[in-house]
Image: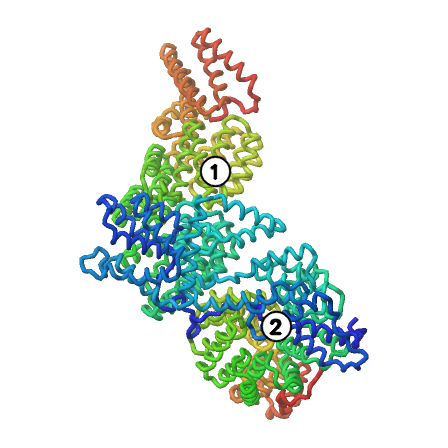
Amino acid sequence: MAAQMDLVEIKRQLCGIVVLCRERGLAHSCKWASELAFCLEPLPLSKLPPPAQFTEEDAQDLDAYTLAKSFYDLKEYDRAAYFLRGCKSQKAYFLYMYSRYLSGEKKKDDETVDSLGPLEKGQVKNESLRELRVELSKKHKAKDLDGFGLYLYGVVLRKLDLFKEALDVFVEATHCLPLHWGAWLELCNLITNKDMLKSLTLPDTWVKEFFLAHMYTELQMIEEALQKYQSLIEAGFSKSTYIISQIAVAYHNIRDIDKALSMFNELRKQDPYRIENMDTFSNLLYVRSMKPELSYLAHNLCDIDKYRVETCCVIGNYYSLRSQHEKAALYFQRALKLNPRCLGAWTLMGHEYMEMKNTSAAIQAYRHAIEVNKRDYRAWYGLGQTYEILKMPFYCLYYYRRAHQLRPNDSRMLVALGECYEKLNQLAEAKKCYWRAYSVGDVERMALVKLAKLHEQLNESDQATQCYIIYIQDVFSCGEILEHLELSTAFRYLGQYYFKSKRYNEAFICAQRCCDYNDAREEGKALLRQISQVRGEADPASTDLSLPFLYGPLSATNTPVRRMSPLNLSSVTP
Amino acid sequence: MASVHDSLYFNPMMTNGVVHANVFGIKDWVTPYKIAVLVLLDEMTVSKCISLLEKRRLNKLILPLLQGPDMTLVQLLKTVEDCCPQLAYAVHLRLHLMADGELKDMESFFDVLPSPFNETESEAHKSSVVGLFMRHMVLAYNKLSFSQVYKLYKALQQYYKSYERKAPPASDATTDADMEQLAPDSLGRKVEKQDLDPSPSDDDVASTEPLSQKQAEYFLAQQAYFLKNDENKALKPAGLQNELNNMLKFNPDFAEAHYLSYLNSMRVQDVFVSTHSLLHYFDRLILSGSDSKSNGDEGYGRSLRYAALNLAALHCRFGHYQQAELALQEAIRIAQESSDHVCLQHCLSWLYLLQQMKGSDSTVLTEHSVKMAVHFSLPYLASLGIQSLVQQSAIRGKNAKKLINALKDTDILHWKHSMSELIDISIAQKTAIWRMYGKSTMALQQAQMLMNMNSLESVNLGVQQNNTEAFTVTLCHLAELHAEQGQFQAASEILKHLKERFPSNSQNAKLWMICEQKIQFDRALNDGKYHIAESLVSVISALCKTEGLYRKALVLKAQNQTSEAYQVLQGLLVYCEKTKCTEMTIRVMLAIAELYWRSSSHGIVLPLLLQTLALSREHHLQKLASETVLHLAFSQLMLGIPEQALNILHMAIEPILAHGAVMDKGRALLLVAKCQVVTSASVPADQRHQALVVAIQNLEEARSYFDKVDCRDRVRDIFYLQARLYHSLGKTLERNKCAMLFRQLNEELPSHGVPLLTRL
């Protein structure tokens, strides 16, 4: 479906909607549409959309509208609304209502600062919402609202916590004016699960594809989202910075760090002054400990605009990587002052407090993050970690479980759960967790070692051996040596195991492998000696056997590991 | 994508990642209500025309006004009017002038306010409660920013207007009608009403308007108190949850609300929400704990320990014993690390409770707990421990004297520390113990004592008597005791009362439900309505498994399904012996003995009955012991040694007549009569005649008892026996009368084929 998109038609539509949105002061939708329009081929003069039809009403309201729009652009909403009060045309009416709405919102935010008491702080309401709702509902009943009007009505309803009604109105708005991205975005905020998404009847346009892709990302259905974006790129939106950024975020969400990093680098190349999503980029750089790149990014963003939430987050990450946690926390706080509903900053601040061993502040930060978004698994995970640090393994189980529920296929939660169960001596549960962590694709490759050690502890040597073997295969097959210590442990155990079960050839090879590692060298040698004693052979080195099961790994160890900086990778389209 | 529409919960009060709810360190904020109170105080100091009586009344009013939650102006003026009408008018007038005037009126009011307490001999001296309050208010007012002052004035106008609107109710109706028109659908209507209704409806606490800090605190405290003591008065679970959610929406930092939410969801057995709320509460508490610098790290660690402990308690309540144990271990470990003995003590008491719930012997633990609690002078925990210990020991058949003595000693402790809750529990426990021992009179007396005792806490919130678990237990015992005596009317009255006080969805409802079912079951069984009894069994089983099984066996036995009954009883016996449930064991053994009679194997029964007798004596269960003696005597009678039977009957007849149920009395007398008749066969004729007369008298008495409990089955038997006896005495008239009555009953009642003589 995406392949058959008529790019020229889409471009025309986009050009049209850009104008409409700009006239109504809908900056974000305008930005989105322009961004998309920019990535498509420019149209010849003949194909350009004709300017919107000018009705008699429009002409009448023109002066008032022009004046009010200039006030609106200067954020003088009340003033704008005042001059628009008698206007009949749709455009002027929308601007009138929207100004009133924004004025109410602005006042609400200002009010919050000087409220009359601690409890009143949450009681500050946008006073104009009720009136707006009454007026809009009358118009709505009379079918007098155009797409933008419906959108505003929906926003008002959502603000009044009438989510069900809001949802219906937004769906109507998308039918009425599918090109208005704002309505889709609002819809996104209201949809909480897959079934809800399926139950809606949405207009069948190309915008829906964008919406679905966005929705899938929100619902953590990353595979589907990536597929959608891929098909959109194939359909001709390959230059769109919007899509690139969305794909990068999606990769970030499934922790495909290399791909995400390459996408972000591509994005930076195309749009060097972009600030949006850069906090996500910095998270990735942080995870990879790429100090110089992060530092460069931070300085660059600081040059562009230092009072942006994203900038503050990036700088916070930078300081965190340099282990200057107080400063990092300070920057996250600054980010939160700029936008208290910035989820990532709350969580990151929690991490910083954890580093500073200020557990109570960390708990507070995480709780705030959860308040902003209940589905933030990182905050739940962080809470779990906090309590684990406080040596309350049972208590933190609950938090890890919550995190696990939200990300059933994330091995980190499972490993954390397993560790807790291990501490509580619930070994059967722990085993289950580790095994599950391995089966969903262990990121840190620790689950198997832990599982093996558990088996070892329970004297289940066969299972332990199995686990170590899979672990070794796993580690070598991906071509990098992550932790020498665990590998040596694995070999040491395997050597002993084979020796005990009198499979000397295997034991011999394992012992040899042991000698590759500093901490296991002595034991390896001792084992070799033992083997040679038992065999009664003089020269242990003469045997040259290879184990079929370890065949791959053995050759892999000898090759030098190449670690390429992801920043140097060429851009790969997924 | 941060859109413009994102609601900004902008919080300027945040420093260092911690939100200070109270940025200026002022607890009191100037509200319109406070202004009204200030006006009142000002008027009181200024005006000269207040009589002494009125003055006294007003002075008594001041403290509640200062400390209570905000009231509407209507309520305030009404309270003042009750004390002193002209002062109420003066306050009203000044508020009217202020609200109808300009901002400067309010400003000037605060300007002149400090003057009265500058004079040293003024009643509102600086350091007095009133002076302090006024100074607080002036300080708070002076700290307000320009826009806040304006807002306050607006709020004052609103406050006054809502008072004026209340007076003529006609205007209200029109706005209501407007709203009806606006509401487009039923779902939207409710929300709309809340949203569009500008007047704060503070009449009831359960309004949807946001509450002020004090109101919220009061609301939480009240609801929590009700939940604990009198669930009926608390809001319904759903309503309460709504209210809490509302409160939390407005102030997410209000941690106590989470705790109440936990309690509330415990009420409806919602594991998920209660865990969530509990943990949320402690997450919040940990913050506030670290916030207060007074106890610093100590306070923070402390709440951590109690968090783990509370989690253990939660799992315990839901019967997740394994989890509870893990959580408890954790709490104990943390408490040990920080050597918090009080917390450890709490852990210990939960530990023995957990052991008890799991059915293992926790006597040693409990004893230890009591000792430690005494050592750390925690009277509450100590007496809880003693009570628990007494309960366990009573069930295990420990020395009764010592137990009662221990209870008496703890009672002294309770009264000393006026722990009314524990006093209630103690009395309830005594009732139960006396009842278990089979001393119904003593049980009755204890129950009556609790009923007639005014609780110490009753003064607080106008609750006449606390609807606690102790009360439920006692009332249930009372109902059963009455039913035993055949006073079914009284029993059903009590049950009706119980139903009113503890509606069927409340926490303690299970107790009276099973009690009611048991009474009905006994009646149905006595009356021979086995089908009714059978239908009741399933209900009882749902409430209590062992009891249900036992009753099922009884029904089966009554319906002559001997082998099925025997199977059930055998299974039950094994189970009871495993769980050391002596009372039930004895009852089951007696039932098994009765089953043996059916097959006329009276010889086999004897060792079983002797074992039962030993067991019941060992556990001081007098009622069951007497019943066993009855069984024993009956067996002996059937084995042809009536003299022996009569001998041992003398042991039992006294306690049965003193304490036993009506049914037992009847059965005992019937048995005595039977024995007398049989023994009379071997004595000379003249003595024999006398013996038969005595037997007839006994039968007569037994009949009166059976009549009381509607046991017409047995009444019929008695008529038969009496007719035979009269016949042998040659009293034809009486014989004919009895025979006729027998005939009547025999036609009414179905014959179940249980031979007359082969049952007790």
Q: Position of residue A386 (x, y in %)?
A: 46, 71
* Left or right of residue A237, residue A351 in this image: left
Q: Position of residue B192 (x, y in %)?
A: 56, 53
Residue nearer the viewer, A258 or A49? A49
User: Up-down: is B476 above or below B726?
Assistant: below
**Residue placed under numbered mark 2 in the picture:** A67
Circle 1 crowding by C-alpha within 10 Å: few under 14, some 14–19, many from 20:
many
Q: Chain of mark 2?
A: A
**Residue placed under numbered mark 1 in the picture:** B588
Foreground disc of the pair 2, 1:
2
Mark 2: amino acid: Leu
* Left or right of residue B558, residue B168 in this image: left
State if disc 1 and disc 2 touch (CB < 8 Å). Answer: no
* Left or right of residue B381, residue A340 in this image: right
Does label 1 lie on the same chain as label 2?
A: no
Q: Chain of mark 1?
A: B
Q: Quadrant of the N terminus of chain B?
A: bottom right
